Image: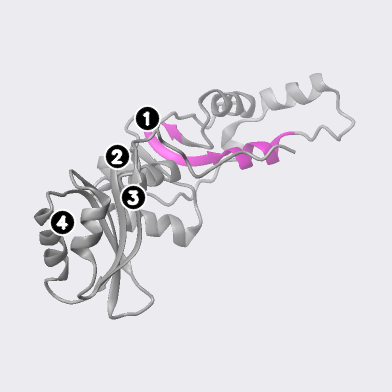
Amino acid sequence: MLVRDWMAHNPLVVTPATSVAEALWTMGQHRVRHLPVVQDGELVGIVTQSDLLQASPSSNTSLSAWERSFLLSKMQVGQVMTSKVIVVDEECPLEEAALVMAEHRIGCLPVVRGRRLAGILTETDLFNVLTEQLGARHSGVRLTLAIRDTRGELSRMAARIAGVGGNIIRLTTLPARDPAYQVVTLRVRDAEAAALVEALSGDGIDILDVRETPAWGTEGFAPHYWRVEG
């Protein structure tokens, strides 16, 4: 997967001359927290919601609401934006872009062709990749297994699943605490959970979790989240 496959291709932008008030309004209307700053089609900076809020006159000052609004209308994005921007190109592997964001603790990456803005990759885009990788929106049997980290183990596991009619629609692997094993999370259709458990049990495969998962939003779907109201 490359950045171009998951980035937003037509991101909202502002110019250095855009007022701070207008940029804040744009963020609020479109529920975004970052805006690339462009001049004549070229990327010249980026501004975040935090940048704009810190630049806004505090309501605790002696200024009236009208005076604060007036100052906001005069203050421009170019005065508060970050001009040294970390960027990637469209051909960057997605995992490398995610690592850049994690290492630099930033919430987005502008994507460029030369100096021209081609798109933007945000944390939300990476969350969407994760949900697709784990099949969160799909029905099926979700299994988490610990299997030996040796040649042919994934193939043998897949053959057992196919042997009971199962079709693997998503699969991802991560290192286990024991370096001799890897943790595999997969989502399987066309096979019952009990049949899968029987086929996979033993011989170097440890079943860590198994559950039936209806598709997101369908009948029987019970999300593992809730809201706490004070």
Residue 131 image-quadrant placement = top left
Q: Which mark is residue 139?
A: 2
Q: How far apart are marks 3 and 1 (CA)?
A: 38 Å
Residue at x 51% of width, y 56% of height: 105
Circle 4 is placed at which residue position? 161
Mark 4 or mark 1, which is nearer the start of the sequence? Answer: 4
Between disc 3 and disc 1, the foreground one is 1
Q: How crowded is mark 3: few (under 14 residues within 10 Å), some or many (20 or more)?
A: many
Secondary structure beneath dot 4 equals helix
- Residue 62, horizontal then vertical, whole percent: 90, 31
Which residue is rendered at x = 32% and y = 49% of the image?
134
Return the disc, 4 or 3, that comes first in the chain's sequence: 3
Q: Mark 1 points at which residue?
A: 218
Q: What residue type is labelled 4?
A: Ile
Q: In this view, does 226 lie to the left or right of 65?
A: left
Residue 28 shown left or right of residue 205 in the figure: right
**Quadrant of image for the C terminus:** top right
Determine if the magenta segment contains residue 155.
no
Residue 55 belongs to the span the image colors magenta:
yes
Amino acid tagged 3: Val
Q: Do the residues labelled 4 and 2 touch (CB within 8 Å)?
A: no
Q: Percent from the top left, x then y, of residue 137?
A: 33, 38
